[in-house]
Amino acid sequence: MREAGYDGPMEQSPQDLAVLQQLIDESARRASPAMRASFGLPEQSLTAAQLVRRCAGVFTAVLATTTAKGEPRCAPVGVLFHRGRLHVPTSADSNRARNLAARPALSLSLFDDAGFALIVHGSGVLVEPGHADFEALEDVQFAARGTRVSSWGRGVFIRIEADLLFSYARDPQGYPG
């Protein structure tokens, strides 16, 4: 959900939104018949602009990674959009960051009682201090939450390189774009 009081700019360019829209469209095309039926794809999917607006600021979702033994691990995390991609602020010392460094596959899921859902499958890449996007990501995080990942010790961001991204809205027209 959008953080109360967050009124920061949308950090997505028209090109970022076009790439995200292509991912949304391709994911709907590749979806299984069961996924298309249960999510009403593509009719009940949000557009890239609607999704970015719905998920402005920092929102909470569940991130799943796997251990060295192949065991799944999931936990609620803060997530933010920047340049059409999802990012998770975390500590480089966290289990999720260590899991992803060794096994980059991940899934992310969000749903609410208002009839919205987001499911993402892909891989995670660590964005560390010194990376070209690190300061911009910290600025987005600070605008939304008043904190910077760099104040957490060895703070990093996990950039989600999505292979599939599905959204569902009970009433897509109710979401501004």
Image (cartoon, rainbow, N blue to C red):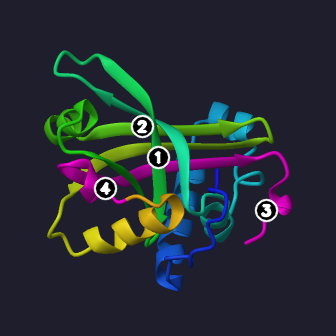
Q: Which residue is mark 2?
A: 107
Mark 1 or mark 3: whose residue is earlier in sequence: 1
Q: Which residue is mark 3?
A: 175
Looking at the rendering, the stretch of residues picked out in magenta corresponds to 148-177
Identify the secondary structure beneath mark 1: strand
Kindly identify which numbered label has been placed on residue 78.
1
Q: Nearer the viewer, mark 1 or mark 3?
A: 1
Q: Nearer the viewer, mark 4 or mark 1?
A: 4
Q: Nearer the viewer, mark 4 or mark 3?
A: 4
The stretch drawn in magenta includes residue 169: yes
Kindly identify which numbered label has been placed on residue 149.
4
Q: CA distance from mark 2 to mark 3?
A: 24 Å
Q: CA distance from mark 1 to mark 2?
A: 14 Å
Q: CA distance from mark 4 to mark 1?
A: 11 Å
Q: Residue furthest bottom?
A: 14
**Mark 3 packing: few (<14 Cα in 10 Å), some, or many (20+)?**
some
